[in-house]
Image: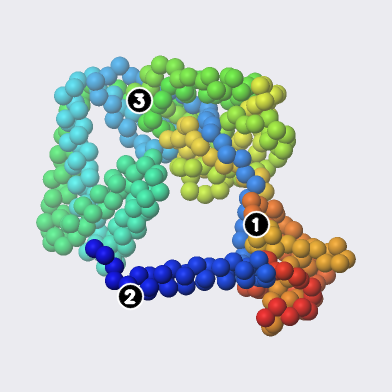
Amino acid sequence: MKLSPIAKILSAVLLLAIVLYFGVEIYRYFSNPFSTTLTYDAAAEDSIPLSGWIVRQEEVFHADAATVTHPLGEGEKAGYGQTIAVAYQSARSLETVSRIETLTLQLEQLEFARNSYLDADAALKLDSSITGNILSLRQRLSGGDYTSVSGDTAVLKTAVLKRTHAYSSIEEVQSEIAAVQEQIRTLRASLSDAQYVAAPRAGLYSALCDGYEGVLTPDFLRTVTPSALNGVAPAENRGNVGKLIYGDTWYYAAVIDAGRAQELKAGQMVTLRLTKGLERDISVTVRSISGEEDGRAAIVLACDKYLPLTTSLRHQSAALVLRSYEGLRIPSTALRQDTDGQLGVYCVTGITARFKPVDVVYQGSGYTLVAPQSEATGSAVLRRGDEIIITASRLEDGLVVR
């Protein structure tokens, strides 16, 4: 399809206008490269990325049985002599145990229904709890934290099932409670082949065993080297009953660049941020730093808090935060010196440029965090939201820029 002469002329005029527009803008930029931006509060961190291992003092338990049940939850405290697992020789016992667990859950639901008649706010409290559990579960799934999903789902399921009995009559509930209790007693009496595994000392129970319990130990960390930590491998996992974790302290061991290891010293307090498992910054102590080995060093960090929240964690990515900085963020190119050698920035005040002295807080990639110079007063103080000049053909205090 051929264009008419008028269409060709209009196309040529449009193309010429576009070229002219960009030509004018390029000329304006190089003749007077004036550009500005606004300051705003920002933060930065000096951190070291890590990939390491969580180490605890642990003891694994094993039982030769067809079925094992765990009366304690993950990370739950076990006292001396307390039952941490029950083993059954008969595979048929699994059905009985499963039935007891179902009836126990049903009993909890019925007892809630009975209590709801005595406490008018019980159902309302449960509704609020269900809503909170749903939001918590959604947050964990969205964040990719699947370590606690199973437990959270079980709690939510129990709460929802409790709510289904909230409107039964009190007589029906009392009668059903008695019947369920009798069934549980009968079933428990039929489990004659039960073998009870007791805690030899107080500790935290965990059903998760991975074979590292006897490999990654506090004794191993005393002389750890980069090659030893990189070559760590699990032993045979025989912990079908679970394990106990002793003491209050857990450790995080990782291999880092030797140059960065020189920034640390034993006894120093730093912040550890695990990628998953613990949704908080953790204050830890640098327990030890190994000698250099092929440009690498092994560091050991210690923490005496949050141990129950780490029972399901082993190999973890993390960040070691050495220092945190806060200030007003500006492009690095906006930082200048006045005639006295004072660092600062030029801000647009009305129609003129005003020099405001600053102190550099942190130098990032392409940006700088600054704070108002301590001796600055009045209109010379840099504040959040100030319009600073990034580029200009000429700058001096009081110069008309607009």
Residue 122 found in image quarter: bottom left
Q: Are marks 1 and 3 in contact (CB under 8 Å)?
A: no
241 sits left or right of 23 in the view? left
Using the rendered image of the protein, determine whether residue 267 is visible from the camera's viewpoint.
Answer: no
Q: CA distance from mark 2 to mark 1?
A: 52 Å
- Circle 2 is placed at which residue position? 6
Relative height, residue 23 to residue 233 (above, below): below
State the residue at coordinates (16%, 47%): 178
Q: Earlier in the sequence, mark 2 or mark 3?
A: 2
Q: Earlier in the sequence, mark 2 or mark 1?
A: 2
- Circle 1 is placed at which residue position? 367
Q: Are marks 2 and 1 in contact (CB under 8 Å)?
A: no
Furthest toward the right, the residue is 340
- Circle 3 is placed at which residue position? 241
- Mark 2 lies on a secondary structure that is helix
Q: Tag 1: Cα neighbours inside 10 Å, few (<14), some, or many (≥20)?
A: some
- Mark 3 lies on a secondary structure that is loop
147 sits left or right of 299 in the view? left
Using the rendered image of the protein, determine whether residue 259 is visible from the camera's viewpoint.
Answer: yes
Q: Earlier in the sequence, mark 1 or mark 3?
A: 3
Q: Which mark is residue 189?
A: none
Furthest toward the front, the residue is 5
Q: Residue flagged by tag 1: what amino acid is it?
A: Tyr
Residue 353 found in image quarter: bottom right
